Amino acid sequence: MHFNRFGGHPADTTDGRQRRRRLRSLIVAIAAILAAGAAAFVFVQPAASHGTSIAQPSRHYSCWERWGSDFQNPAMEQEDPMCWAAWQNDTNAMWNWNGLYREQVGGDHQAAVPDNQLCSGGRTGGTRYAPLDEPGAWKTTPVNANFTFTNWDQANHGADYYRIYVSKQGYDAQTDALDWADLELVKDTGDIDPGVGRPPATGGGTLVDIPVSAPGRTGHHVVYMIWQASHQDQTFYACSDVWFGPGGPTPTITPDEPSPTTDEPTEPDPTTEVPTTGGPNGYACTATAAVNSWGSGATVTVKVANTGTQAIHNWMLHWQWPSGVTVSNSWNATLSTMGGMQMAAPASYNQAIPVGGSVEFGLNVAGSLASAPAFDCLPS
């Protein structure tokens, strides 16, 4: 059994592993039932998103909250240079604020996430989140020694645990990229069942409030979250910038609710489970897939539909192929991978979907595929 050197806690628990095995078994059983009853055409349920810390806000959520509805404003470069740099590096660092996670970490976070790469989750998604690792003038939220840390669990994943760290006094967030040795573990929640918390004012899922005590600190510090989701071995990481004591900024958001912005393009991230009737500000999408199989391969045609009350400016899907299935070619979408996850982003001409409308893309695969996998959709 691996132990975390900061908290002295087991990397995983027997209960957590058993719960994930039960959930996976249930998913496999449901998939088998669907495959038996609908071999070539599969309706894919609407998806909720994953989530991140919103109070104190993670760096990527904070950027999206301030600039998501104003992303073309050139003032961002001068007023918020750290967010500007992240935006210039990869627009998805902002739009995929709820998708900074790694899979199959097995509780060994320090092996998966090297020093100087903590805020990007060990550069998960390639270089997408790499600018989040950069020290500098990140916008901070004022806190006291005792404060409430809030995570938005958008898909009611639940948690095997949340581990909340705060940088030690003497750490310089302006010049020093975060290392494990810079952190002190201040809270380990243990198991939190899916849905335990309070509902957000907008959007789905649950707000999980975690009381934190971090005395003896002044100035700019980093709060670091490890959220081990309970639905599968999926771990979310986040850096939040806070200010202890006098001299800090005026708060820009409240911890009581997320306040997602409207509009704007470029790939947000997806997720699994839990149907929704509408996401933040009325955004919602579903996917259906028709599979034309010839045994050693198949053509998959995917329809993405706007089922919300707001026009969609952009969307993204992700899914996992069965073992042995690989993509030969695709059209009307851009495919990428993150770990074992396949992702699809729209082309420039089919990223916008009006209310009640839909768009399509397609791909050919090699390998045996009788029915479509479960797609996850996130609109913006």
Image (spheres, rainbow, N blue to C red):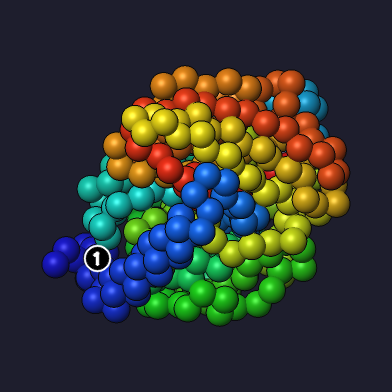
Q: Answer yes or no: is residue 79 visible.
A: no
Q: Answer yes or no: is residue 50 visible.
A: yes
Q: Is residue 142 above or below residue 123?
A: below
Q: Nearer the viewer, residue 318 or 98?
A: 318
Instruction: Report which residue position mark 1 lands on.
Output: 11
Q: Where on the picture, by quarter, is residue 8?
A: bottom left
* Percent position of residue 184, x then y: 35, 63
Residue in view at x 34 percent, y 30 percent: 296
Residue in view at x 31 percent, y 69 percent: 21
Residue in view at x 40 percent, y 66 percent: 29
Q: Is residue 207 above or below residue 167?
A: below
* Percent position of residue 325, x then y: 35, 35
Q: Where on the picture, by quarter, is residue 246?
A: bottom right
Q: Nearer the viewer, residue 171 or 246?
A: 171
Residue in view at x 29 percent, y 37 percent: 324
Tell me if 315 is positioned left or right of 156 in this view.
right
Identify the element where label 1 is drawn: loop
* Percent position of residue 235, x then y: 39, 56
- The N terminus appears in which quarter of the rendering? bottom left
Q: How many marks?
A: 1
Q: Is residue 266 above or below residue 9?
A: above
* Percent position of residue 181, x then y: 28, 52
